[in-house]
């Protein structure tokens, strides 16, 4: 049985200083579900990933990484007629990371309901989806909905990370409608402090809600109780990937049957590992290292 089934868009990512002045850059592959799948696999969980990549070098690199990390990529589709999406991340002193998306018409955005294996999701312990994949277009959104429906019908636990990226949505109103819909389907909800207003209908006492509070740490409301954890004081190299690393740690502890405080603790450990690395996923720990 698969522990966690997830679906998303694998992306190339180029990281540098301000491009107009920089002579060097770093190439990697990324994606929130991509990071989560690798994090869980390193902790010994069986994780399956659904997505589409192009038959280009970035697509080959993404698949190579996933396979090498022990993630099940049986359902990943290779599309020859387009390209793998790309992110450009520019770091600037004293300012937030500037991220530019080059993913219009990308292979990942072609993910469709017909790609979703209903039986494999039904045979999993948990389905994890994000609002970022839901924002890629109508077909991708319908694929996420199809996966969620399959999990609900099979009584598989559903985990949802809001992952709101404003530039990927036509309007805030549409984002609120879709993100609230998916959040209301979830048993386990991950979001940042600034995303609370986007999914207000889902913030009900019976739902397990995990909130990333930035420098203040994180909190969870579970079984009508609130628990908090402080973030680890570590050297911060790059904050990209920290959110999904935290979600992976929390989900891992939940799969292991740990209590909410212990889930928060493991999430904080993985988040700290993520920010100390230049990569979203390369610095994440194995079970032994954890």
Image (spheres, helix red, strand yellow):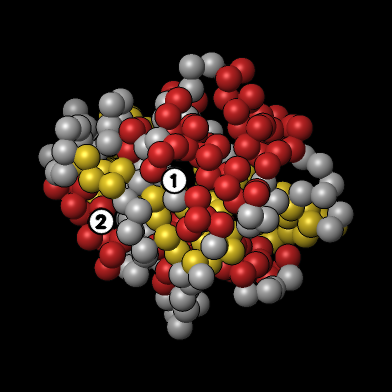
Disc 1 from disc 2: Cα separation: 18 Å
Q: Is residue 207 left or right of residue 29?
A: right
Residue plotted at (59% across, 64% down): 125
Q: Is residue 220 visible?
A: yes
What crowding class fits label 1: few (fewer than 14 Cα within 10 Å), some (14-19), or many (20 or more)? many
Q: Is residue 96 visible?
A: no
Residue 130's place in the image compared with 216, above or below, is: above
Helix, strand or loop for disc 1: loop
Of the image marks 1 and 2, the number of the one nearer the N terminus: 2
Nearer the observer: mark 1 or 2; the answer is 1
User: Quarter-wise, where is residue 73 in the image?
Assistant: bottom left
Helix, strand or loop for disc 2: helix
In front of the other: 207 or 232:
207
Residue plotted at (37% across, 59% down): 281
Residue plotted at (19% across, 28% down): 20
User: Quarter-wise, where is residue 92 in the image?
Assistant: top left
Percent position of residue 183, x then y: 66, 39
Residue 126's place in the image compared with 144, above or below, is: below
Residue plotted at (22% across, 60% down): 64
Percent position of residue 261, x then y: 73, 67
What crowding class fits label 2: few (fewer than 14 Cα within 10 Å), some (14-19), or many (20 or more)? some
Q: Is residue 218 left or right of residue 106?
A: right
Q: Is residue 268 left or right of residue 169?
A: right
Label ID, residue 63: 2
Percent position of residue 280, x then y: 38, 54
Residue 160's place in the image compared with 234, above or below, is: above
User: Quarter-wise, where is residue 172 in the image?
Assistant: top right
Residue at mark 1: 116
């Amino acid at each position: 049985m698969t522990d966690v089934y997830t679906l998303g868009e694998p992306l190339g990512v180029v990281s540098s200083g301000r491009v107009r002045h920089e002579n060097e850059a770093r190439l990697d592959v990324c994606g929130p579900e991509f990071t989560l799948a690798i994090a869980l696999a390193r902790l010994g969980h069986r994780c399956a990933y659904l997505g589409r990549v192009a038959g280009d070098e970035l697509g080959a690199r993404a698949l190579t990484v996933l396979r090498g990390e022990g993630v099940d990529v049986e359902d990943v589709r290779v599309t020859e007629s387009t390209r793998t999406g790309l992110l450009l991340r520019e770091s600037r002193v004293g300012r937030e990371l500037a991220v530019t998306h080059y993913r219009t018409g990308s292979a990942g955005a072609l993910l469709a309901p017909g790609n979703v294996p209903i039986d494999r999701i039904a045979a999993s312990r948990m389905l994890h989806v994000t609002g970022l994949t839901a924002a890629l277009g109508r077909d991708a959104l319908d694929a996420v909905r199809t996966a969620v429906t399959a999990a609900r019908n099979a009584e598989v636990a559903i985990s949802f990370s809001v992952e709101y990226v404003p530039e990927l949505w036509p309007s805030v109103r549409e984002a609120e409608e879709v993100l609230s819909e998916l959040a209301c389907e979830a048993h386990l909800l991950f979001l940042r402090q600034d995303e609370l207003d986007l999914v207000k209908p889902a913030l009900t006492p019976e739902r397990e809600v995990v909130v990333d509070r930035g420098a203040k740490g994180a909190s969870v409301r579970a079984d009508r109780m609130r628990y908090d954890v402080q973030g680890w004081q570590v050297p911060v190299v790059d904050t990209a990937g920290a959110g999904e690393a935290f979600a992976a740690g929390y989900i891992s502890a939940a799969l292991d049957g740990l209590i909410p405080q212990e889930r928060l603790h493991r999430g904080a450990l993985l988040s700290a590992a993520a920010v100390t690395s230049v990569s979203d996923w390369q610095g994440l720990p194995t079970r032994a290292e954890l």
